[in-house]
Image: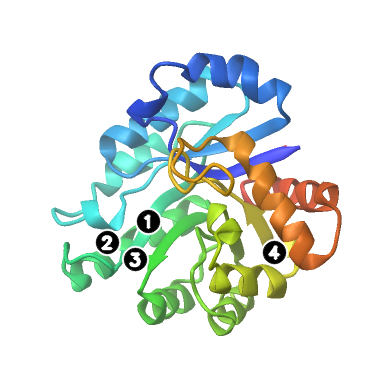
Amino acid sequence: MIFDTHAHYDDDRFDGDRDRLFNEYFPHSGVCGVITCGTDEQSCQKAVDLAEKYPNVYAAVGIYPENTENGVNIEKLRSLSNHEKVKAIGEIGLEYHYEGVPHDIQKREFERQILLANELCLPVIVHNREAHNDTLEILKRTKPRGVIHCFSGSVEVAKEILKLDMYIGLGGAVTFKNARVPVEAARYVPLDRLVLETDAPYMSPVPHRGERCDSVMIKYVAERIAKIKQVSVEEILEMTEKNARKLFNIR
């Protein structure tokens, strides 16, 4: 059974067939759970609306680092988090690849959202791109539960994340032709600390590069990780579903 711990089903690329995906295609293709993540106030509300509409969809609400320049409305996030199907604060974190929001603002708003998650006893879904040192420093100081989404760090960074009792999220990148870093992470991270994700509609795995991604494509990620770890695909899917349900407190 496929549990997709990170997607963006509010994206307008799903407007034409969203109902068909959730009501027909996913149930018949083994998708048993999806976390759809907000990145700004509008998409957070949409994530909650989707979770309310579809049985196996859950929401994460948070403000993406590139959307934090004017500060995060913590009270709005707190209000949205009152919904029973909001299971995490995310997608939050640090984005240093692009020259956008100043790093000091990103770090401040990242920490504010982590503190909200801690207050609400919710895990965090962390975006970390080219900001490993600052991300680790903040996580070590604030000690949230959660997952590093689309993990892109070294094995050394993975070791530090695991010491914090957090999870590692892997997706389509592990299937890419020259995917050295995700493959090393997949080999190192123990199965009980691994969750699978798509980042749909982005990051489609091989053999669907360039296409719109959806949760069913996790099967290609599972197949690749199974080969790396020399275990069965069924074991990967079973364990990562169990991990996702534990992390997000979903029965």
Q: How far across and how far down the image is residue 123, in percent? A: 53, 54
Residue corresponding to mark 1: 92
Q: CA distance from mark 4 to mark 2?
A: 27 Å
* Depth check, front residue: 198 or 105: 198
Residue in the image at 27% along x and 33% along y: 42
Tell me, yes or no, whether the two marked residues, 3 and 1, touch with CB atoms within 8 Å.
Answer: no
Numbered mark located on residue 122 in the image: none
Find out whether the residues at labels 1 and 4 contact each other: C-beta distance under 8 Å.
no
Image spot of residue 185 (x, y percent): 62, 72
The N terminus appears in which quarter of the rendering?
A: top right
Q: CA distance from mark 3 to mark 2?
A: 5 Å
Under circle 2, the secondary element is helix
Is residue 250 visible in the rendered image? The answer is no
**Residue behind mark 3:** 111
Badge 4 local density, few (<14 within 10 Å), some, or many (20+)? Answer: some
Q: CA distance from mark 4 to mark 3?
A: 23 Å
**Can you identify the residue that label 4 sits on?**
193
Numbered circle sitting on residue 109: 2
In the image, taking residue 105 as reference, residue 247 lies left or right, namely right
Residue 147 in the image: x percent, y percent? 55, 60
* Residue visible at 39% across and 82% down in the picture: 133
User: In the image, which is nearer the foreground, mark 4 or mark 3?
Assistant: 4
Earlier residue among tags 4 and 2: 2
Q: Please identify, in this view, whether the residue under mark 3 or under mark 1 is nearer the observer.
A: 1
